[in-house]
Amino acid sequence: MLHDNLILILILLLGVTLLVMVGQKLKISYPIFLVLAGLIIGFIPGIPHIKIDPDIVFLLFLPPLLYEAAWFTSWKDFWEYKGGIFLMAVGLVIITSMAVAYASVAFIPGFTLALGFLLGGIISPPDAVAAAAVLKGLKIPKTVSALLEGESLVNDASSLIVFKFALVAVTAGTFVLHDAAIDFVSVAGCGILVGLAIGGIFYAIHRWLPTTENIDTVLTLITPYFMYIVAEHFEGSGVMAVVSGGLLLSSQSHIILTSSSRIKTVSVWSALIFLLNGVVFILIGLALPDIVAGLGPDYPIGRAIGYGVGISVLALVVRFIWLFSTARITRIFNKKTRVRYQDMTWHSSLVIVYAGMRGVVSLAAALSIPVMISDQIPFPLRNLILFITFVVIFVTLVVQGLTLPFFIKWLNIPAPKHKLSEQEQTSQIKLKLIDLSLDKLKADYQYQCTHNELMVNLKAELQHSLIEKKDTLKAFKAGQIDQVDLKAYHEIVLALIQVQRDELHHLKSNKNYDDDIIRKEEWRLDLEELSITSSE
């Protein structure tokens, strides 16, 4: 039994990897392609059906996915746009849940208000991974990406809290809005406190105990699970615990991790998150056959699809109205908001509206609905809720996701006028760092810079770099460098790096050079190449 399950898992992982490569070849974002592939594979006769255990999704997948998102979220951007993020991650979730609840009662036979809030809590949070994967490589303003990243960090917590209260209302038959609001605040607050406390403990471990690169990496892997499990044990929000703790530790990463630990940790996490995301999205597609089979004769599939499409359109309309109305109101009454969001044109707001794609959290929440309320009473309309959830995921993720790049291209979002380009910012930062280094040499190492040949060369190299960076900045400001020149420059530098990498490969057979020295040089070239490819 264990052997068969292991083979099935390995086949699944291999399949995910191969499908991602096919998706890249077809230039389709991998979350979308994996959902479609899983959907097709699931209906092939003889293929074993894979059932998603929601507890595994919440416990195994969700903590590291949230922690990674929190770790790479800019705390500066998160704090600067906290007002807009809060309105989207909490206010929009609650408004969407209410709209879905009342619309479901009005148009879907048999739906109660509690079931409507249950469905609203399930489909209200957009998926962070899907939006990030689809938007990757597309030119969008920094404000848009900051708002989407911040929303995706917090909205899972608020939507799952709404979902849990609605689930209690269905099973217990009672729902008191005042009590639910108080519990909402206490659950979120408890999660934040637990996350900060656990984050403080791991901060101390990283900071004051004798760790190594491997130990630091392992600690980062187990940290989100501690945060999530402890918060859930004390009836707090595990999601808020992971997010708050992750933001705390990421803001201190320059203190608690060495450079080598950071590089190794990023490499390990990059592979892990890729694997987890791939498995999650293909499981979404594979889950459909069982969902369709459980729909039953009471709700024909055509009518059920109509309900799902209607809820998808409703969620999109509510998101549009909420974003544009709150943006207008806050700008009227708050001058600081007008300055902070001056890059936000109506084009950018439409991108945020259209990027609200649902994903794994919605499906896991729907699957966690119990089959039975008691020994003799089945949970009402469970299969229909599952099917509607899948339709909403399909419409928002696949349909919106496939058309989002074309939508952004059609909008032709104007570039921010008051901000420097990424290349100019990079040059200015490097210029400041070189200036600081030269000042340090002059103040503390004057003697060594005149008597130590290595230090003489280092100082000359820094001075040369200083002149080069100043000339580069002048060329940018004078408009002498355009995107064509910059692209050609990058292509030549990459070609030079490839020549050097080929030479290092040949030097591996030369007994005069140690492999570890060659590997260090290869790593330096990798970092240089990464600095170019990431900026593009």
Image (tube, rainbow, N blue to C red):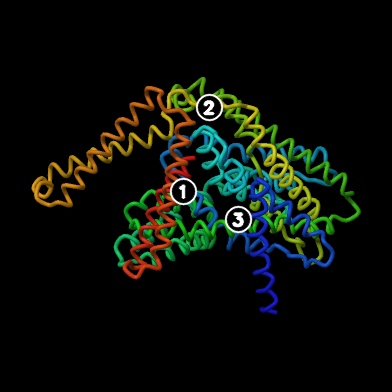
- Dot 2 lies on which element? loop
Which residue is found at the position 68% from the left and 33% from the top?
Answer: 318
Amino acid under disc 3: Asn
Q: Position of residue 48 (x, y in %)?
A: 78, 68
- Dot 1 lies on which element? loop
The one of 128 and 237 positioned closer to us in this rendering: 128
Q: For residue 336, say whether it is visible.
A: yes
* Residue with the mark numbered 3: 277
Quarter of the image for residue 437 reads top left
- Dot 3 lies on which element? helix
Of labels 2 and 1, earlier in sequence is: 1
Say which mark, if any, is on residue 72: 1
Of labels 3 and 1, earlier in sequence is: 1
* Numbered disc in front, either 2 or 3: 3
Of labels 2 and 3, earlier in sequence is: 3
* Residue with the mark numbered 2: 344
Amino acid under disc 1: Phe
Q: For residue 167, say whether it is visible.
A: no
- Quarter of the picture containing the N terminus is bottom right
Which residue is found at the position 75% from the left and 38% from the top?
Answer: 102
Q: Position of residue 309 (x, y in %)?
A: 78, 40
| 120 sits to left or right of 518 | right
The one of 5 and 365 positioned closer to us in this rendering: 5
